[in-house]
Image (spheres, helix red, strand yellow):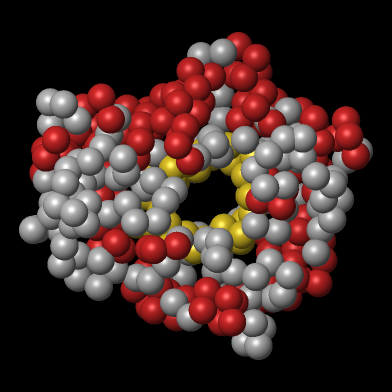
């Protein structure tokens, strides 16, 4: 079944507010997605998000989003939470082998270890249940990503012949099967990002896996289809192969047009933000021509602390394109 075109903005959980909800609702942006901070503290920030699901103030915001007609989703680097380093002493074989032949709990997992995959999938299913709130309409879409780092894949005897994309695909397929056990309509994103930007070679996606393309290594000052820009030429190169494997139904772009955390160097206080309208309009035209049905963006570091410094952020170009996508 073909997915209706959609869009979302991704904000940090502590930035969710009535202001952001109203901004989305008034601009015609149908979904607001919560993105816990990644990096070395991704496990802690994800645990904090799960704890928020029992906080009355947070639940009141979810109810308000529902009253304004918005869907709420959750997108996060989740592997540090799904396979905590505390398990290393008991199960070192669950963790990746680095280039020196040493098991290490630093990043991701051993993608060839069935017990590790079962444990990760169980934790993912539990997290998904906790994030499925009766206060909001379910989208049945889940976004549980591997660790946000380069060089974090397994080099054991069984894994070394698998590309990073193949290893991610194995983990993603296994998580989806666990999600479908309690949500038969569940679908799960394959994040085409950094080392996993190229499609998997030997492992095919299960039914219910959809593409999420996040061109983090692009040049943000030029349209992605500007072939004169080497970074953008390289970032766009995998798209045809990705779409050939995953298809366009449900295919999502996750861009950085409004990601003031990136433009602020991931440090507070946030810097003043100016939307690059020309790039936004050109990129939307390019992605729509390719057949993406979901075109979304990070929008972090534009919360109440930003407004206290600079006033309300101007996101009109992005909102206009999102509204046009969803209404056409």
The image shows residue 56 at horizontal and vertical percentages of 60, 11
Q: Residue at x 27, y 54 (%)?
A: 153
Please, which residue is most extreme toward the left here? 157
Number of marks drawn = 0
Q: Which residue is drawn at 49% across and 63% down?
A: 213
Can residue 231 be seen here? yes
Left or right: 63 as drawn, with respect to 37: right
Instruction: Locate the C terminus by quadrant.
Output: bottom right
The image shows residue 179 at horizontal and vertical percentages of 30, 39
Q: Residue at x 62, y 19 (%)?
A: 58
Task: Give the quadrant of residue 324.
Answer: bottom right
Relative to 186, is 155 above or below?
below
Instruction: Locate the N terminus by quadrant.
Output: bottom left
Please, which residue is most extreme toward the front here? 100
Q: Which of 293 and 33 is in front in this view?
A: 33
Please, which residue is most extreme toward the top here? 56
Q: Nearer the viewer, residue 60 or 265?
A: 265
Can residue 294 be seen here? no
The image shows residue 252 at horizontal and vertical percentages of 52, 61
Q: Residue at x 16, y 39 (%)?
A: 94
Relative to 267, is 263 above or below?
below
């Amino acid at each position: 079944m073909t997915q209706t075109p959609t869009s979302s903005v991704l904000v940090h959980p502590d930035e969710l507010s009535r202001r952001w909800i109203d901004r989305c609702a008034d601009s015609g942006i149908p979904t607001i997605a919560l993105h816990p901070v990644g990096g070395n503290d991704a496990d802690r920030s994800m645990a904090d998000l799960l704890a928020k699901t029992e906080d009355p103030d947070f639940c009141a915001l979810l109810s308000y989003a529902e009253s304004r007609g918005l869907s709420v989703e959750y997108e996060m680097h989740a592997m540090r939470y799904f396979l905590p380093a505390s398990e290393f002493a008991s199960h070192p074989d669950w963790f990746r082998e680095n280039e020196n032949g040493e098991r290490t709990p630093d990043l991701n997992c051993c993608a060839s270890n069935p017990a590790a995959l079962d444990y990760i999938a169980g934790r993912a299913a539990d997290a998904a249940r906790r994030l499925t709130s009766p206060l909001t309409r379910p989208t049945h879409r889940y976004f549980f990503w591997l660790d946000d780092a380069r060089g974090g894949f397994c080099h054991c005897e069984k894994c070394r012949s698998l590309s990073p994309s193949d290893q991610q695909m194995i983990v993603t397929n296994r998580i989806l099967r666990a999600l479908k056990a309690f949500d038969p309509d569940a679908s799960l994103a394959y994040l085409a990002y950094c080392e996993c930007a190229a499609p998997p070679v030997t492992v095919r996606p299960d039914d219910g896996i959809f593409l999420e393309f996040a061109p983090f290594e692009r040049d943000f000052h030029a349209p992605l289809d500007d072939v004169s820009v080497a970074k953008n030429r390289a970032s766009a190169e995998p798209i045809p192969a990705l779409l050939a494997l995953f298809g366009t139904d449900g295919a999502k772009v996750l861009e950085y047009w409004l990601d003031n955390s990136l433009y602020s160097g991931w440090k507070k206080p946030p810097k003043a933000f100016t939307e690059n309208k020309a790039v936004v309009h050109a990129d939307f035209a390019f992605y729509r021509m390719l057949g993406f049905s979901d075109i979304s963006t990070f929008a972090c570091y534009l919360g109440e602390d930003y407004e206290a410094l600079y006033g309300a952020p101007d996101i009109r170009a992005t909102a206009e394109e999102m509204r046009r996508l969803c209404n056409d």
